[in-house]
């Protein structure tokens, strides 16, 4: 009886690890911001979005009547993710507008100045 219970517990732990490995490991990055558009209108957002990028995204979404999600993640470098239901030309326009240099600022270490 105890051996059967232990086997079931080990199988469940194995299945949980497999699930985590395949499905939960795909989004490891820190989400900087997320915008949800529905029929060209911004319905919700999270995080701090650069003002100019938000303005331009709203204009593109309104003109194209987009229903999508735009998300920026940081995993080492910053990546911009757009829903798969958006065409490649619009995705490229959004990537061209995105201020990658805003997030790639290097911090200057003043503690080791020579002088």
Image (tube, rainbow, N blue to C red):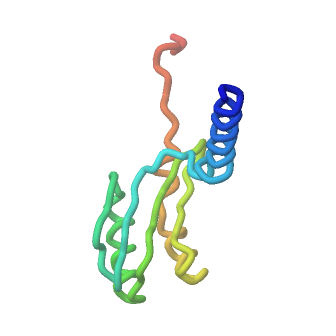
Please state, as top left, top right, bottom left or bottom right, where the N terminus lies in the image.
top right
Q: Is residue 31 above or below residue 42?
A: above
Taking depth in this image into account, of 76 and 1 the one nearest to the observer is: 1
Taking depth in this image into account, of 95 and 23 the one nearest to the observer is: 23
Q: Residue at x 34, y 67 (%)?
A: 54
What is the x, y in percent for residue 53? Answer: 39, 65
Q: Residue at x 39, y 81 (%)?
A: 61
Q: Residue at x 28, y 72 (%)?
A: 43
Q: Is residue 29 above or below residue 37?
A: above
Taking depth in this image into account, of 51 and 61 the one nearest to the observer is: 61
Q: Is residue 38 above or below residue 9?
A: below
* Furthest residue in direction front, as rendered: 1
Q: Residue at x 57, y 83 (%)?
A: 87
* Furthest residue in direction top, as rendered: 115
What is the x, y in percent for residue 105? Answer: 49, 42
Q: Is residue 114 left or right of residue 61?
A: right
Taking depth in this image into account, of 52 and 3 the one nearest to the observer is: 3
The quarter of the displayed image where residue 51 is located: bottom left
Q: Is residue 110 left or right of residue 51?
A: right
State how many labels appear.
Answer: 0
Q: Is residue 64 left or right of residue 83?
A: left
Q: Is residue 71 above or below residue 94?
A: above
What is the x, y in percent for residue 58? Answer: 34, 76
What is the x, y in percent for residue 86? Answer: 53, 81
């Amino acid at each position: 009886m105890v051996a059967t219970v232990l086997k079931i517990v080990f199988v469940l732990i194995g299945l949980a690890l497999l699930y985590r490995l395949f499905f939960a490991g795909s989004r490891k990055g820190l989400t900087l911001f997320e915008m949800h558009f529905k029929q060209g209108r911004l319905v919700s957002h999270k995080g701090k979005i650069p003002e100019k990028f938000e303005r331009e995204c709203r204009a593109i979404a309104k003109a194209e009547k987009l229903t999508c999600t735009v998300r920026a993640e940081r995993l080492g470098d910053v990546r911009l993710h757009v829903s798969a239901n958006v065409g490649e030309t619009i995705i490229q326009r959004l990537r061209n507008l995105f201020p990658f240099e805003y997030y790639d600022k290097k911090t200057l270490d003043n503690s080791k100045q020579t002088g």
